[in-house]
Image (cartoon, helix red, strand yellow):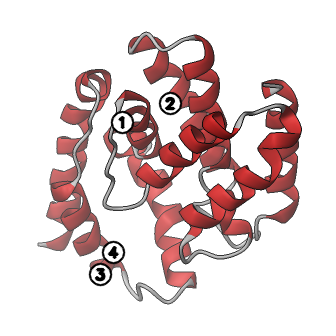
Amino acid sequence: MQFEKVKEFILGKLKKELAENLTYHSLGHIKDVYAAAENLARLEHITGEDLTLLLTAVLFHDSGFIESQKDHERLSCEIAEKYLPEYDYSPEQIKRVCSMIMATQIPQSPKNNLEQIICDADLDYLGRDDFFKIGNTLFSELRMYGILSNEREWNELQVRFLENHHYFTHSAKVLRVEKKAANLLIVKSKIK
């Protein structure tokens, strides 16, 4: 697997082809999830081929937004399936990458440790200090799509999402659960 070359390729493609009005599902989001996945992988003792496949899945997981917001996970897999063979990924490796990408679909349904890590990395910000800053970029994007129209709807959606969300890996639970609960209380206080 030529990971560094595929990383350079897909980051370049995303930078060039993702719509500028994607305020949340942007290159910044991919890089944020990448950093979170690297951190969780280290804490979960993921190395070697597993680490390479995990980080590959992170790089491709929202590439489908190049084509459409709807069903973007499946589209992301199609993009991975199209390009990864050019970088010496085997059919079995590509299948594992796509399985990780599909696990990030909401509601998340990871079936193994690598899928749990990518799911936790994708929503790592829920339990961080930059929760509101990042959340505002998602609010803007959802308004742009016409999914939400005002801040009350957004806060109500966030409460439902935060209450239903849970981290999967031990490492993410240790790192993020407490702050996520504090963030939820703040969002609830905005609705009252």
* Residue bearing mark 1: 116
Q: Earlier in the sequence, mark 3 or mark 1?
A: 1
**Spatial separation of the CA atoms under disc 2 and disc 3:** 28 Å
Q: Earlier in the sequence, mark 4 or mark 2?
A: 2
Assess whether mark 4 and mark 3 are in contact (beta carbons under 8 angstroms).
yes
Mark 4 neighbour class, 10 Å CA radius: few under 14, some 14 to 19, many 20 or more? many
Comparing 148 with 129, the one in front is 148
Determine the residue positioned at 76% across, 69% down. Answer: 20
Determine the residue positioned at 58% across, 43% down. Answer: 95
The answer to whether residue 8 is visible is: no
* Residue bearing mark 3: 153
Q: Nearer the viewer, mark 1 or mark 2?
A: 1
**Spatial separation of the CA atoms under disc 1 and disc 2:** 12 Å
Mark 2 neighbour class, 10 Å CA radius: few under 14, some 14 to 19, many 20 or more? many
Q: Amino acid at mark 2?
A: Ala
Label drawn at residue 36 = 2
Residue 18 position, x and y percent, is 77, 64
Q: Earlier in the sequence, mark 1 or mark 2?
A: 2
Label drawn at residue 154 = 4
Element marked by disc 2: helix
**Spatial separation of the CA atoms under disc 1 and disc 4:** 26 Å
Determine the residue positioned at 64% across, 24% down. Answer: 52
Q: Spot the residue most to the left.
A: 192
Q: Quadrant of the N terminus?
A: top right
